[in-house]
Amino acid sequence: MISTPLGTGLLRFKSGALCFDPARIGRPGPALFDPSNPALQAASVAVGGRQSAWFVSGEVPAAVLRHYRRGGLAARVSRDRYLWTGESSTRSFAEFRILQLLHGQGLRVPAPLAGAYWRAGPFYRAAILIERIPQVRTLAEALEAPQAVAQAIFAMHEAEVWHADLNAYNILLDKAGLAWLIDFDRARHGPVGLQARRSNLLRLRRSLNKVAGQRGLDCWVQIHRAYEALSA
């Protein structure tokens, strides 16, 4: 076991490796990513996750375990295998770094606990373990707090992160009415220009329209106005 920069632990095992937060994970190992491990007390996430996300506890702090899965046409080729292009490019390690960056700046995103990959020839599989945000509803369910949602999106963009799938299920609202952003798979770190910001907002518009029709569009208009005011 060695430590990488920023205090992240790194543990290598026979077919892969995992990175982890040593302050939160006392006994790192591949078993942390196995939902059949009874120590995790895993329960399937009911909404989203492509049947590959679980709430876990016991062996780890209250967390969400997610195995990376493909969607759409790509899933017909392989549901969970990705082309190997290097350790730092694995979906789990990349998302761990993005979450670590945003969480370290005080943005409302779940803290990353651990990320892992398993390599087999030119392909790999991956999983990530993130902090569970208690007592939240998705924006798709709530359709409220547009100012808080706009502030969360604007803060992410100002931190130079672009979200790859900013839909109504990837925005959570807590009991205090604060907005949290989740699922940073394939997110990019770097300057976020006007076109990239617009693409995130339009993706959210399509999602809200799909899940709630006119009520969703009305919610998006309020979010967009609040975002524009922050950008002025």
Image: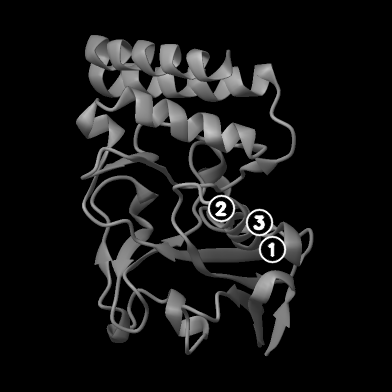
Q: Is residue 152 above or below residue 213?
A: below
Expressed as whole percent of the image width and height from the top left, the position of residue 106 reads: 52, 51
Between 217 and 206, the residue placed more toward the observer is 217
Q: Earlier in the sequence, mark 3 or mark 2?
A: 2
Among all residues in the image, which is located at the extreme right?
Answer: 85
Rendering coords of residue 160 (x, y %): 67, 37
SS at badge 1: strand
User: Residue at (24%, 26%) from the top-left corner?
Assistant: 144
Which residue is drawn at the image coordinates 64% and 63% (left, top)?
93
Q: Work out how far the residue at label 1 is from the one at label 3, CA to CA, in angstroms.
A: 16 Å
Residue 164 visible at all:
no
Disc 1 vs disc 3: which is toward the camera?
Answer: 3
Q: Dot 2: within a 10 Å radius of its alpha carbon, few (fewer than 14), some, or many (20 or more) residues?
A: few
Residue 100 lies in quadrant: bottom right
Q: Are marks 2 and 1 in contact (CB under 8 Å)?
A: yes
**As shown in the figure, which amino acid type bears the numbered disc 2?**
Ser
Query: How many residues crowd around disc 3 within 10 Å: few (fewer than 14), some, or many (20 or more)?
Result: many
Q: Amino acid at mark 1?
A: Phe
Q: Please state the horizontal and vertical placement of residue 78, each as a whole percent of the image.
A: 56, 52
Kindly identify which residue carries mark 3: 94
Q: Picture coordinates of residue 215 (x, y %)? A: 23, 14
Instruction: Identify the residue at image location x=33%, y=16%.
Output: 209
- What residue sits right under mark 2 in the picture? 78
Query: Which mark is first along the chain, 1 or 2?
Result: 2
Label 3: which secondary element: helix
Number of residues whose C-alpha sits closer than 10 Å to that of mark 1, classed few (under 14), some (14–19) or many (20 or more):
few
Query: Cβ–Cβ below 8 Å for labels 3 and 2?
Result: no
Q: CA distance from mark 2 to mark 1?
A: 10 Å
Dot label at residue 87: none
Task: Give residue 123's mark.
Answer: 1
